[in-house]
Amino acid sequence: MKKIVLAYSGGLDTSVAIRWLSQKGFQVIAFLADVGQGEDFGPIRRRALACGASQVVIKDLRESFAREYILPALRAGAVYERKYLLATALSRPLIAKALGEAAVAHGARTVAHGCTGKGNDQVRLEVTLKILFPRLAVLAPLREWELKSRAEEIRYAARHKLPIAPPSQSRFSIDQNLWGVSIESGPLEDPWVEPPPEAYQWTKEPSRAPARPLLVTVDWLRGVPAGINGKRLSLTRLIERLNHLGSAHGIGRSDLIEDRLVGIKSREVYEAPAAHILHAAHQELEQLTLDREMLIFKEIVAGRYARLVYDGLWFTPLKAALDRWVDESQRRVSGRVRLKLYRGTLAAVGRGSPNALYRKALATYQGKDEFDQRWAGGFIALWGLPYAKP
Ligand code: ARG
């Protein structure tokens, strides 16, 4: 029998896909990437087997996800359309790479995924596979099969006695990992409707968060978060810890009408507490340690970087080149940022660095300073010269 390695999540689409592919005559190997979705893999493994997988392969990719994908995007300041911190998008090149490696290891010539034909993820996975494993064939059952809606998939699952998750949660399509949760579909498809409370998976409703603000400090070394509240932590642990603290204070929600790569506008709700806290802290420290020309250029790089990630162009020359620029830009970005978390709001309230470009002796309004105010008149005359009437 022909082997196929399917990127399996345990959700409705890919559970149905296992059965559908077996009926097409494939021996299905379910490949599960652990990118920190924090789920119990026991039931997911059993579900895959019950749906007809011949074996289940689970790979722990958390460390590599944090260090090689999340970190470069954080240092680059990558945020898509002002609100999306790219949790799903960042995981895709890594999952595609691991999926291709699994196919090679198991002697399969074909891989499959559970992305729809309307989304970004199919592009991210397949472009990455094409770059890294040009000889692998790719199947996308959701683009081919006759099941036209989630409701039809649920009926298919019932007909084939597939043990899928309860339909209450199946209303939403949820993708989660260490960097955040993406939630769409169901009631969220009406852009006028406020997300119902049960749409949110991690974060506390801000009005129910503690009435006392929480202060958190984040330490940075050359643009890498190294510890919180004075304690050194590995990147993965640090992100987990901030997700936990942020969630309790209702931090990190966003609700976005976003532009998909395939031309559709869609509504997606996100939760990314650690990502919001780290981006805010990082930007604050850059503001203290980088000169204004660097800051202006960094914004351009950040925007381009976010697009590359969103558009599935991770393993490309431009991305590699931007990484080198970002790395260079982070040499001075060390220090500490103090943030206040309070009922869904996040504010940096203090920042310090041995590389600070802020000089009190220049900025002060109190008494003796180093700034000779007599220089200002000449500067203004030259600055305004091009616009002065003759
Ligand atoms: N819109 C996001 C992206 O394109 C997330 C896609 C997956 N979302 C989901 N709810 N399953 O990166």
Image (cartoon, rainbow, N blue to C red):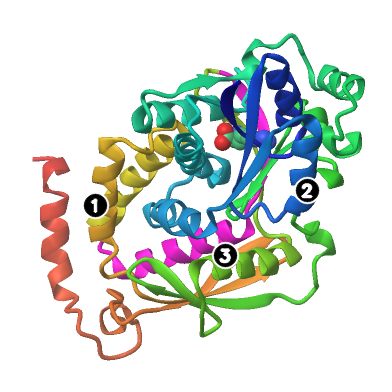
Give the main secondary structure, helix, strand or loop, of the magenta stretch. helix
Ligand 1 lies in quarter: top right
Q: CA distance from mark 2 to mark 1?
A: 36 Å
Give me the residue at 61% from left, 20% from top: 1
Residue kind at label 2, given as amino acid type: Tyr
Residue kind at label 1, given as amino acid type: Arg
Q: Secondary structure at mark 1?
A: helix
Q: Which mark is residue 324?
A: 1
Q: Secondary structure at mark 3?
A: helix
Q: Earlier in the sequence, mark 2 or mark 1?
A: 2
Is residue 181 visible in this depiction of the protein? no
Q: Earlier in the sequence, mark 1 or mark 3?
A: 3
Q: Quadrant of the C terminus?
A: top left
Q: Is residue 109 left or right of residue 340?
A: left
The residue indicated by pointer 3 is 239
Q: Are marks 1 and 3 in contact (CB under 8 Å)?
A: no
Q: Which of pointers 2 and 1 indicates the residue nearer the eye? A: 1
Q: Is residue 361 left or right of residue 381?
A: right
Q: 365 and 58: which one is in front?
A: 58
Give me the residue at 24% from left, 52% from top: 324
Q: Which residues are magenta?
A: 264-292
Location of residue 115 by image quarter: top right
Q: How far across and down, in percent of the image, does residue 53 sit?
A: 71, 33
Residue kind at label 3, given as amino acid type: Ile
Give me the residue at 27% from left, 74% from top: 357
